[in-house]
Image (tube, rainbow, N blue to C red):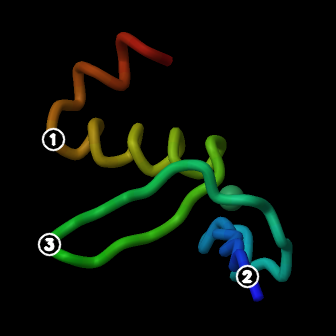
Amino acid sequence: MARKIVETLYCDACAKKGLEVVGTEKLTIMGREWDMCLEHAERFMNQLAGALDPTEVALSA
Ligand SMILES: [Zn+2]
């Protein structure tokens, strides 16, 4: 019997709010991984970028 198992990844940040939103982005830091929807990925990326280089957020805002 041929069997195909499809795994759906959901956004971890949305899941905390009880929402099932497909995670299309992956955030990996020191071996830990989070799946993110595009909106959350952008939000966390901006926070990280701002922490590392505050001028970058000022330019993209
Ligand atoms: Zn999300």
State how far apart marks 3 and 1 are (Cα). 16 Å
Q: Identify which amino acid the numbered label 3 is placed on.
A: Met
Mark nearer the viewer, 1 or 2: 2
Callout 2 secondary element: loop
Quarter of the image for residue 22 reads: bottom right
Task: Point out residue 9 in the picture as x, y percentages from the top left corner.
Answer: 64, 69
Mark nearer the viewer, 3 or 1: 3
Which of the four quarters of the rendered structure image does ligand 1 lie in?
bottom right
Whether label 3 touches label 1, CB < 8 Å: no
Q: Identify which amino acid the numbered label 2 is placed on.
A: Arg
What residue is drawn where x is 43% and y is 15%? 60
As drawn, the residue found furthest toward the top would be: 59
Task: Point out residue 7 in the picture as x, y percentages from the top left corner.
Answer: 66, 74
Q: For the N terminus, give its image quadrant.
A: bottom right
Picture disc at residue 30: 3
| Relative depth, front residue between 43 and 37 | 37
Q: 51 left or right of 45?
A: left
Q: In this view, does 25 lie above or below 6?
A: above
Mark 2, residue position: 3
Task: Point out residue 42 in the picture as x, y percentages from the top left corner.
Answer: 52, 39
Callout 3 secondary element: loop
Mark 1, residue position: 52
N-terminal-most mark, 1 or 2: 2
Q: Identify which amino acid the numbered label 1 is placed on.
A: Leu
N-terminal-most mark, 3 or 1: 3
